[in-house]
Image (cartoon, rainbow, N blue to C red):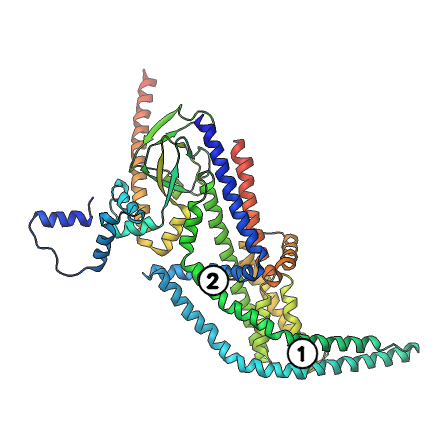
Amino acid sequence: MAGSYENEVKETGASKLELTKKIDFSMMKYLWLANPLSGTRKDSIPKFLRNVELLKNFSDNELRILAKYMHSRKFAEGEVVFRAGEIGIGFYFVFSGTIELSHDDLGTDVSDEKFLVLEEFSYFGELALLQEGNQRTATALAKNKCELVGIFKPDLDNLIVRHPVIAAKLIQSISIALADRLYFLTSEASKMYKRIKQLEAK
Amino acid sequence: MILSNRKNINKIQLIYFVSVIVLFCTLVLALPRISIPLSLAYILSLALTPIVSSLMALRMSKTMATLFIFVVLGFLVGWPLVKMIPMLSTESQNLQDIIPKIEQYIILQFQYLREFVKLKTGHEIGDAYVYQGLQELQNWSTSAVVRIPNILANLMEWIFLVPFFTFFIIRDSDSFKKTLLNSTPNMIFERFYYVIHVFNRQLGNYFFAKLVEAIIVGGIITTGLLIMDIKYAVILGFVAGLTNIVPYVGPFIGVVPAIILGMLEYGMTSPTMGAILMLYAVANAVDVFFVFPFLVSKIVNLHPMIVAVSVIVGSHYMGITGMVISIPVVAAIKLIVTEIYNEIYTERSR
C-alpha cells in the first residue's frame, strides 16, 4: 500500500498535521475516480492492481494508465486459459476466482498433476512478456468462475513507446520477481548438487 | 463432463465470432463507396500512428496528438493545393489546346506513313479507320469533360471522408481494439491478438517504406525535370512518385504522361526526350537497386510472381486502391496462413 494517497491522508490525519491547502487537480481527479459511489469497472482494475505485491512501486496514476493497457478476460469453470507447449504472449493477474497450474497437457484430465493453485492478487505467465516465442511450461485451468486481468506483448510494445517510465517500471518489477526466483532456484540447485556429492561419497 | 460441455460452448463462441467478422468484411467490401475511403483512411492511420505514439510520449493526450498531426498535415497538404488550383485551371485550358495538337500529330504521321507505303508498294491505305478513331477520341474527351463534375463530387466525398475516418481511427483505435478483443473467444484470444498486432505492424511498415520510396523517386524526377526546365515538372514528378506505389506496373504508368508531353513539346527523336527517358530510367534504377532492397523487400518477402498476380487481382476488384493495398494484404494473408499451419502441424504433433 506504500505510495498510496489514501495512506498519506491517513498518516497526516493520524499525526494531526494540517492537510495541504493548494488545490491539486490531478489529485481531485483521482479522488473523483476513487469515489466508492462511482464504482464503475473503469477504476476497479487500478484498485485491484494497487493490492498486487508485484506492482508496489507504481503510483496510483501510473496504475490508472497501466490499467488502460490491460484486458479483462472472463473464464468459466473448467475452461483452459492456456496449455503447456502453446506459444504465449500474455501475463495474467487473478482478479477473482482460482487458477490451477499443472504440468499435464492437452485434453486429458487436467487436475491430475496440479502443482500450484493461484488465488486473487497472484500472477502467472510473466515469462511470455519477456521471451520471444515463449512456450508455456504449464497448463492453466480455471478451477471455478474466474476473472483475469492480462497484459500482452503488443500492449507492452505500445506502453514502451507511449509511456516509457511505466513500461520500465513494469519490466523492472517482473525482473525483480524473476531474479528472486532464479536466486532461489540456483541455491536449490547448489544444495542438490552438494547432496548428490555427499550421496556419491558414501 | 464439464470439459465436454465447455468444448461445445467454446466451439459455438468461435463460430459466432468468425461469422460476425466474415459478415462485417463482406458488408464493407460490398459497398465500395465506403470500403475505398475506409481502406485509404486505415492505411493513412497506420502510417501516422507512430507519430501519434511519439507525441504521446511527450505527455500529450491522444486526442491532442491526433489533432496536432491533422493541423500540421492540413497545412502541408492544403497550402500546395491552394497554390496548385490556379495552376491546374490554366493547365486544363492548355489540355484543350493539346488535344487538337495530338490530333494534328496523328494525322500528319499517318499521311507520312501513307505516302511511304504508297511509294514502296503502290497501295493506298484507307483512312476511314484513322478518322473514325480520332472522332472517338474526341467523343471520349467530351464525355470525360462532362463526367468531370461527377468525378469531382466523388473526389470531394473522399477529401472529406478520408480525413474524417482517419481522425477517428487514430483517436479511437484503442477502444475499437478493446471492443474487438473483448468479444474474442478465450480459445483463440492470444493468437488472434498477436496476429492482428503483427498484421498492423507489417502493413504500417510497408506503407511507411512505400511513402519514403515515393518521396525519393518523385524527388529525383522533379529535381531532374526542373533542372532540364521542362514544363509541368512538379506535376510529372508527383505522378511518378504516386504511381511508384504500385509495384512493377507503377513506374511504367508513371512515365506515360512524360512521354506524351515530351513527344508533343519536343518530338519523339529530340535529345530532350532522350534526357527525360534517361532521367526516369535513372530514378527507377536508384529505386530498384538501392531503395527497394533495403526498405521494402525486408518487410514483404513474397515471390515476384505472387506480387504480380496479387496486383492484377487487386486492380480487378478495387481499381487503383486494390493495386496499392494488394501486396500488404497478401503478405498478411501469408502470415495468417503460416500461423494457422504452425498451429495445426507443429504444435499439435509435438
Residue A131 vertical position relative to residue B105 in the rendered view, above or below: above
Q: Earlier in the sequence, mark 2 or mark 1?
A: 2
- Residue B273 spot, x, y in % from top left: 68, 78
How many C-alpha atoms fall within 10 Å of the one at disc 2: few (<14), some, or many (≥20)?
A: many
Judge left or right: residue B232 versus residue B47. right
Seen at 59% across and 75% down, the residue is B149
Label total for image:
2
Q: Name the residue under label 2.
A: B165
Q: Quadrant of residue B325?
A: bottom right
Observer-nearest of A159 and B284:
A159
Residue B312 in view, yes or no:
yes
- In this rendering, do the residues under marks 2 and 1 share a single chain? yes
Q: Mark 1 points at which residue?
A: B262
Q: Which of labels 2 and 1 is toward the front?
A: 2
Chain label for disc 2: B
Observer-nearest of A197 and B227:
B227
**Disc 2 element:** helix
How many C-alpha atoms fall within 10 Å of the one at disc 1: few (<14), some, or many (≥20)?
A: many
| Residue at the top extreme, as displayed | A202
Residue B149 vertical position relative to residue A152 in the rendered view, above or below: below
Judge left or right: residue B59 versus residue B75. left
Q: Which amino acid does the dot numbered 1 rest on?
A: Gly
Observer-nearest of A200 and B188:
B188
Residue A80 vertical position relative to residue B265 in the rendered view, above or below: above
Observer-nearest of B178 and A83:
B178
